[in-house]
């Protein structure tokens, strides 16, 4: 299983139920890595999508304990073991914080967009640079959008 996440300098990922920022090229990168695959996400991350609707061209597996929560075009799982039993090997975990935390042990590859900025935040991803279980495998050149510098970094489980 893989994951994809965008983090700032402090590995922050969200604030007030939304992303820290939107970088158009990063959204394309996200699409390229997820279209045609299964995505795994939490109910609160689903709520951040336009209309709260699942992502097109992808199988959407949602984690939620909410009774009766059944968005059209998505599968809802009430617990991690049930989700893992149904998830294919090529599934991509796309957040948010609670779902990354629950499924990081299942992941062997992390596609991290590292944004060289500090945002106010209330959700974070574990710092993989400080985690001895992970190593950085590849990094793109520095890119820039609207004054924000960022790069794509691939981490692999050792
Ligand atoms: N920077 C990025 O790459 C990125 C990516 C994704 C999201 N985000 C940000 O992350 C934030 C959202 O993260 P979050 O942690 O608050 O919410 P989340 O992980 O998206 O969703 C949390 C919800 O998922 C369900 N859930 C989580 N673990 C579960 C489990 N083990 N079993 C059953 N259901 C489970 C629960 O739904 P119920 O309450 O329905 O039970 C829980 O309230 C937002 O700010 C979002 O913008 C950032």
Image (cartoon, rainbow, N blue to C red):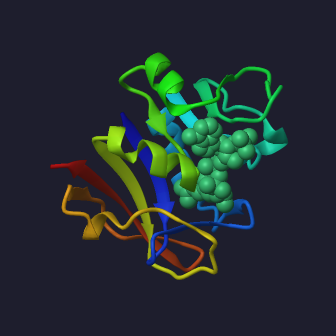
Above or below for 28 versus 25: above
Residue 50, given in percent of the width and then of the height, sits at 79, 43
Residue 81, given in percent of the width and then of the height, sits at 48, 27
Residue 5 can be seen in this image: yes
Above or below for 119 versus 49: below
Q: Which residue is drawn at 26% across and 64% down?
A: 131
Q: Residue at x 47, y 45 (%)?
A: 102
Q: Which residue is drawn at 45% across and 25% down?
A: 84
Q: Which residue is drawn at 55% across and 80% down?
A: 147
Describe residue 54's horizontal placement relative to residue 123 as left or right: right
Above or below for 148 versus 112: below
Depth check, front residue: 79 or 12: 79
Residue 103, given in percent of the width and then of the height, sits at 43, 42
Q: Residue furthest left?
A: 158
Depth check, front residue: 101 or 72: 101
Q: In which quarter of the image is residue 13?
A: bottom right
The N terminus lies in quadrant? top left
Describe residue 143's horizontal placement relative to residue 131 as left or right: right
């Amino acid at each position: 299983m893989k994951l994809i996440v965008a983090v700032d300098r402090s590995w922050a990922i969200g604030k007030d139920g939304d992303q820290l920022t939107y970088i158009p090229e990063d959204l394309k990168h996200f699409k390229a890595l997820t279209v045609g695959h299964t995505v795994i996400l939490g109910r609160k991350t689903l709520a951040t999508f336009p209309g709260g609707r699942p992502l097109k061209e992808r199988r959407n597996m949602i984690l939620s304990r909410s009774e009766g929560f059944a968005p059209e075009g998505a599968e809802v799982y009430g617990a991690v073991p049930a989700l893992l039993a149904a998830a294919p090997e090529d599934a991509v975990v796309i957040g948010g914080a609670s779902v990354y935390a629950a499924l990081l042990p299942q992941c062997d590859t992390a596609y991290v967009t590292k944004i060289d900025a500090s945002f106010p935040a209330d959700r974070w991803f574990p710092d993989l640079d400080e985690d001895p279980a992970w190593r950085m495998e590849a990094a793109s050149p520095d890119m820039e959008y609207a004054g924000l510098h960022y790069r794509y970094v691939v981490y692999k489980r050792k």
